[in-house]
């Protein structure tokens, strides 16, 4: 990409504006932990009366265990439990992994329902899904 007269020749964008735009979200992403209610809706506190044994419970346990099948995902889950708040930018700083790798692990945990991710402007804030964590503990206790 060449810059001519303060404009990116590839996109026709003023390069000073492009740099300011790029810097702003990164700075915002670094300010990380916000109040729990700010990004994640209240947790479902209903009592879970589903059985902890049987074919459906076994499938559920296998799915959750598969999501926890990597030590980085266990570390992320522990971090979110320990913070007990939404985390936006600190997860990458807490782990010795690249941002793209952390994002992939977060995606797996979110797809399994162990965490929630809420879009907050240019970033995604993550928090624990307490009902699913309680369910995992119950299923593990039923072994």
Image: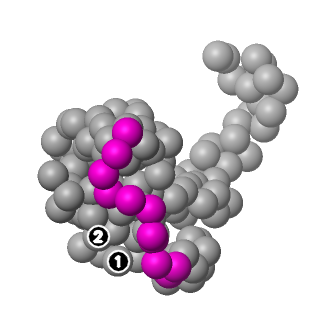
Where's residue 45, x and y in %?
50, 81
* Residue 108 in sight in this render: yes
Q: Nearer the viewer, residue 99 or 72?
A: 72
Where's residue 63, x and y in %?
36, 38
Asked whether the beta carbons under mark 2 and mark 1 sit within 8 Å of each other, the answer is: yes
Where's residue 142, x and y in %?
20, 58
Q: CA distance from mark 2 to mark 1?
A: 5 Å
Residue at 60%, 60% (x, y): give it.
118
* Residue 87 in sight in this render: no
Point out which mark residue 84 bears.
1
> Secondary structure under badge 1?
loop
Magenta span contains residue 53: yes
Point out which mark residue 81 bears.
2
Display coloring? one colour
> Secondary structure under badge 2?
helix
Magenta span contains residue 92: no
Residue at 27%, 64% (x, y): give it.
138
Corner quadrant of residue 79: bottom left
Q: Bounds of the magenta span? A: 45-55
Q: Nearer the viewer, residue 117 or 4?
A: 117
């Amino acid at each position: 990409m060449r810059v001519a007269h303060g404009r990116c020749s590839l996109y026709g964008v003023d390069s000073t504006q492009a740099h300011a735009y790029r810097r702003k979200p990164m700075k915002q992403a670094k300010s990380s932990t916000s109040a729990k209610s700010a990004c994640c809706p209240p947790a479902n506190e209903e009592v879970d009366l589903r059985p902890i044994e049987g074919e459906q419970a076994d499938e559920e346990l296998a799915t959750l265990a598969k999501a926890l099948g990597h030590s980085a995902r266990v570390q992320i889950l522990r971090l979110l439990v320990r913070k007990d708040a939404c985390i936006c930018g600190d997860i990458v700083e807490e782990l010795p992994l690249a941002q793209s790798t952390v994002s992939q692990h977060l995606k797996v945990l979110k797809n399994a329902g162990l965490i929630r991710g809420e879009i907050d402007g240019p970033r995604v804030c993550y928090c624990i899904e307490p009902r699913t964590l309680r369910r995992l503990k119950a299923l593990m206790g039923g072994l």
